[in-house]
Amino acid sequence: MLYDAVDDPSDRTPRELLAAYRRELSSVVDSVGIEPVAAESGVERATLEALQAGESADLSLEEAAAILATDDRFPGADAVVYELRDHLLMGMSSAVVDVDTIAADIEADLTGQEVQQALEGRTRFTLEQLAEIQAAIERRR
């Protein structure tokens, strides 16, 4: 479910995590098919084709969850999003790290408040931001 796209995320860079997220999403598109995924997820066909071709695709967490939810191996999109957010928040708790520390530790131009808003689902949360935040949390565990 994205956060577990690699076996040991603690020694992975944000770029490696992002590539793993994209591989996981691409495998869903491969197994389910572009047309059914587009119809069920609401993600544009061109975006899915770019993802499948290994190109950069600007996806939000919600869009990625909708793609995963088209595959029977995954729960519904809301459950994917909630589980991922819960995983990140639990990671922050066990690493004893706050949103301001994460904001200072990532390359994305986000303040601590914006990191918190992304984690809470109050603003768009891109896969790139997810990769940076997950990597920052995992480094501190």
Image: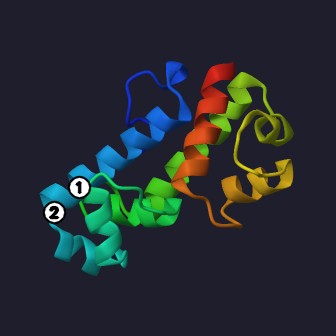
Horizontal side of residue 50 vs 100, given as left or right = left
Measure the alpha-carbon separation of dots 2 and 1.
6 Å
Q: Residues within 10 Å of mark 2 (few under 14, many from 20)?
A: some
Residue beneath label 2, please?
Answer: 32
> In the image, residue 20 lies at what x, y percent?
37, 39
Question: How far from the left and from the top, in percent, is residue 108?
Answer: 70, 48
- Residue at the (51%, 48%) spot, across then down: 83
Q: Secondary structure at mark 1?
A: helix
Give the residue type that dot 2 points to. Answer: Val
The residue closer to the viewer here, 46 or 85, is 46
Query: Which quarter of the rendered picture does the N terminus lie within?
Result: top left
Three-letter amino acid code at the position of disc 1: Val
Position of residue 43 measured from the top left corner of the image (x, y, whole percent):
37, 74
The x and y percentages for residue 63 are 44, 66
Quadrant of the drawing holding the C terminus: top right
Residue at horizontal 19%, vertical 70%?
34
The answer to whether residue 72 is seen in the rendering is: no
Q: Could you tell me which residue is drawn at 75 percent across and 59 percent down? A: 117
Q: Are marks 2 and 1 in contact (CB under 8 Å)?
A: yes
Q: Nearer the viewer, residue 37 or 91?
A: 37
- Which secondary structure, mark 2? helix
Which label sits on residue 28? 1
- Horizontal arrangement in the rendering, residue 129 relative to residue 52 (left or right): right
Residue 71 shows in this picture? yes
Q: Residue 77 occupies which quadrant of the picture?
A: bottom left
Q: Is residue 30 above or below residue 13?
A: below
What's the mark number on residue 85? none
Residue 10 position (above or below residue 76): above
Neighbor class of circle 1 (other Cα within 10 Å; few <14, some 14-19, many 20+) is: many
Q: Residue at x 16, y 57 (%)?
A: 30
